[in-house]
Every structure is written in structure tokens, then in C-alpha cells.
Amino acid sequence: MKIEYLPADETDAASILEQSRALIERYEDFSSIDMDAVFAWMERKTEKCIAEYSRILCDGETAGWIRAHDDGEKLELDDLFILPQFRNRGIGTATLRKYLRESGKPIYFYVFSQNAGALRLYERLGFRVRETVSDTRVIMEQEPCQKTTKQL
């Protein structure tokens, strides 16, 4: 299996938004937030930040996307999406390990607290909950390169 990363562009925006919407609809509590406002914000963010996204390729096919945002002191991994037909093949793990090896900075991200599969993956790679930010989301973080080569 060959995994590659290419810069995303405007042609990826609709697919990224589709993945964002599906994740939000599955895990967000819309009784406490304005769904239309959340989706409008996601659209603006995706369009504005498309240059920060990478398209994840598996054997030449688009398998997903990831956005990495360097805030100066830390690297935020945002919007890691693996398409359903590519899940459970190690692509998400390989992608996270790539960023862990290359970042040289603490890495953090927001994750839905009910997304059990994502939580298991992140915890297996050494991420820990740093903060609960809402009833539905937590921030997970890991310091850079404190792992052995075998773990990476």
C-alpha cells in the first residue's frame, strides 16, 4: 500500500465539506447549537483554508484529507477524514505517524467525545485528553517525538 500526500485545491472543497457535515451530523448535539450556523462556518473555513489541506492518496486514489495548521507553538491537526471504503486499512494511523515524526512540535486536535473509533486510534498513538471543551468535544494532545521508533 502506497500512501502519498498532495496539496488539496478548490476541487476538493465539496468532498471535504461532505465529510465534515457527516461527522458533525453524527456526533454533534444540535439541541444546544445552531446547525445552520455551524455548517456555514465550516464552509467559510474550508474555502479560506483550502491551501492548508492535503489530499491523502492510497495507491493513487483519493482516500481522504487532512488539514494541518501551525499556530507557531503547536500544530493543530484538523479535519482528518478517511473515506469509508479506505477505513481500517492503516491510512489514518500512517497519516498521524507522519505528522508526529515531522512536526517537531506538540500536536493537538479537537475530537468528538462520542467518536469511539477515533479516540481509540488517537490514544493508541499516545494522545491524551487535555481539555473538555463542550458536552460533545475534547482536545487531545501529544508532545513531539517522545515515542520509540517502533511506535512510529
Image: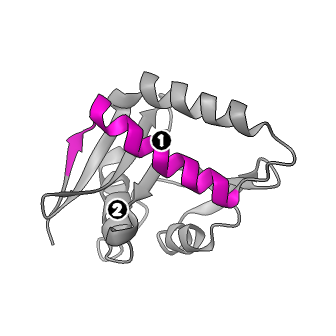
Q: Position of residue 139 (x, y in %)?
A: 66, 51
Which residue is painted at 44% across and 52% down in the image? 80
Labels 1 and 2 touching (C-beta < 8 A): no
Secondary structure state at the residue bearing disc 1? helix
Depth check, front residue: 128 or 61: 61
| Residue 152 colored in magenta in the image | no
Dot label at residue 5: none
Residue 94 vertical position relative to residue 19 in the rendered view, above or below: below
Q: Which residue is mark 1?
A: 17
Q: Is residue 114 visible?
A: yes
| Residue 19 colored in magenta in the image | yes
Q: Residues within 10 Å of mark 2 (few under 14, many from 20)?
A: some
Q: Position of residue 79 (x, y in %)?
A: 48, 47
Q: CA distance from mark 1 to mark 2?
A: 24 Å
Q: Which residue is mark 2?
A: 97
Q: Amino acid at mark 2?
A: Arg
Q: Quadrant of the C terminus?
A: bottom left
Report the side of 145 relative to 118 (left or right): left
Q: Position of residue 30 (x, y in %)?
A: 79, 48
Residue 123 vertical position relative to residue 105 in the rendered view, above or below: below
Q: Is residue 105 visible?
A: no
Q: Would you identify the image quadrant in which residue 26 lies? A: bottom right
Magenta region: 5-27
Secondary structure state at the residue bearing disc 2? helix
Q: Amino acid at mark 1?
A: Leu
Report the side of 45 relative to 99 (left or right): right
Q: Quadrant of the N terminus?
A: bottom left
Which residue is painted at 33% across and 28% down in the image? 51
Which residue is painted at 32% across and 73% down in the image? 90
Depth check, front residue: 127 or 14: 14
